[in-house]
Image: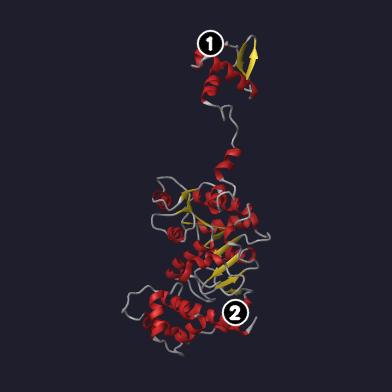
């Protein structure tokens, strides 16, 4: 690693502790002057001229003459400056067997660049697997107080996605998140790619919620843990909400399995929709409060109805590059006698007796067709194996 790369690594590690996730002023400052100068400005080692203030205002889309936003940012960051120790944070990361992924590294998920100015400064990553390409990532999110129905559907979706080579992304929380991770681990854990990814609202050294500690340890071993905040960071409501944008941006598709009318899962779905990512929602009982949020997404057009993994894969991939859910189900459905028949042939098939043969004239009356239509139709049904000559007449071939 070159000296410049090491400096950028240390700088981004420091900034990720200094700024809260999606700190608009901090991220705009980085976009205007770069991470190294942004940190120097935050430490008041260098001043800011009129040009930088103007460009910062433009980056934040502020009207001309408005109060300089950097003043509030400097005041907000000042209490944390004394605690910045990126070398210590990176040493702790090494002890965990983790790694820091930055936009300058080849391992950076380029899908996060769609967040533009809201993209994270870096990712603190734990796990032996690399982060898979976005095209193979599917997010399953939902209520923490999931129902038996929600858990069952989540297991089916995660297992179906895993067997088709997808990595399941979720937030490591109770309920739908945990079930998605467990099913993915049970299906493809120990394989050559990450079975599942948990994006955390706290440091990757903290197993939160505590009740999911064993699950999160398993994900660290067979999948990937990701956070945009450094080790030791506590989970907060703001960090949970901002974590959702990473789930949405990283994944090719986001599916809400269960969600109440007001739910963090809906926040993830709206982030995905805002990024132009497809969103799916699983329908539930109209009497279930846990499905009210899903029905809300379906009603307002934010989401498409999905019922199985084939639907999700169809939604995730460009048209023609993934197996289509409806075609997959059609292939699995039993073939019926009348499939593909024209209306006249269908009328004729319905008029054919199963036991005693009948004549062309009688079929003409029963089916409401001309003699010519009956004769040509019988020929087609005979070729299809649906009609047979018998005793000087015609009858339907028995199965």
Residue under the point 61% across and 14% down: 394
Q: Nearer the viewer, residue 370 or 315?
A: 370
The picture places residue 318, in percent across and down from the top left corner, at 55, 53
Q: Nearer the viewer, residue 323 or 398?
A: 323
Q: Is residue 143 left or right of residue 136?
A: left
Find numbered disc 2 in the image and state the secondary structure of the residue it sits on. Answer: helix
The 10 Å Cα crowd at callout 1, few under 14, some 14 to 19, many 20 or more, is some
Residue closest to the far top = 392
Q: How is the image coloured?
A: secondary structure
Name the quadrant of the N terminus.
Answer: bottom right
The picture places residue 13, in percent across and down from the top left corner, at 54, 79
Residue under the point 56% across and 68% down: 226
Q: Is residue 4 above or below residue 356?
A: below
Q: Quadrant of residue 69?
A: bottom left
Q: Looking at the rendered structure, which numbered label has been put on residue 362?
A: 1
Find numbered disc 1 in the image and state the secondary structure of the residue it sits on. Answer: helix
The label nearer to you, 1 versus 2, is 1
Q: Which residue is mark 2?
A: 92
The picture places residue 279, in percent across and down from the top left corner, at 48, 54
Q: Is residue 325 left or right of residue 48?
A: right
Q: Is residue 131 left or right of residue 296?
A: right
Residue under the point 55% across and 22% down: 345
Q: Is mark 1 in CB contact (under 8 Å) with mark 2?
A: no
């Amino acid at each position: 690693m070159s000296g410049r790369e090491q400096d950028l690594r240390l700088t981004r590690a420091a900034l990720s502790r200094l700024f809260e996730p999606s700190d608009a002023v901090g991220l705009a400052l980085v976009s205007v002057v770069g991470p190294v100068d942004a940190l120097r400005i935050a430490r008041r080692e260098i001043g800011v001229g009129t040009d930088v203030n103007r460009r910062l205002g433009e980056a934040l889309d502020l009207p001309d003459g408005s109060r300089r936003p950097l003043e509030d940012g400097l005041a907000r960051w000042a209490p944390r400056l004394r605690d910045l120790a990126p070398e210590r944070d990176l040493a702790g990361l090494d002890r965990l067997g983790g790694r820091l992924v930055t936009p300058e590294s080849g391992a950076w998920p380029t899908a996060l660049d769609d967040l533009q100015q809201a993209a994270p400064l870096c990712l603190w990553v734990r796990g032996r697997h690399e982060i898979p390409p976005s095209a193979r990532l599917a997010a399953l999110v939902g209520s923490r107080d999931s129902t038996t129905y929600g858990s069952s559907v989540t297991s089916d979706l995660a297992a179906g996605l895993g067997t088709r080579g997808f990595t399941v992304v979720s937030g490591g929380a109770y309920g739908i998140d945990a079930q998605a991770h467990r099913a993915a681990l049970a299906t493809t854990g120990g394989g050559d790619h990450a079975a599942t990814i948990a994006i955390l609202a706290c440091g990757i050294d903290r197993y939160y919620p505590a009740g999911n500690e064993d699950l999160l340890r398993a994900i660290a071993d067979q999948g990937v843990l990701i956070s945009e905040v450094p080790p030791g960071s506590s989970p907060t409501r703001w960090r949970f909400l901002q974590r959702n944008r990473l789930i949405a941006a990283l994944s090719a598709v986001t599916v809400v399995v269960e969600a109440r009318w007001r739910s963090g899962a809906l926040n993830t779905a709206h982030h995905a929709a805002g990024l132009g990512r497809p969103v799916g929602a699983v329908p539930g009982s109209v009497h279930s409060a846990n499905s009210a949020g899903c029905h809300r997404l379906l009603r307002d057009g934010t989401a498409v109805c999905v019922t199985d993994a084939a639907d999700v894969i169809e939604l995730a991939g460009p048209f023609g590059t993934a197996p289509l859910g409806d075609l997959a189900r059609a292939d699995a459905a039993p073939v019926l006698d009348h499939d593909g028949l024209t209306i006249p042939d269908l009328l004729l098939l319905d008029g054919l007796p199963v036991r005693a043969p009948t004549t062309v004239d009688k079929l003409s009356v029963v089916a409401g067709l001309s003699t010519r239509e009956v004769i040509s139709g019988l020929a087609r049904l005979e070729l299809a194996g649906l009609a047979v000559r018998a005793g000087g007449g015609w009858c339907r071939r028995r199965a």
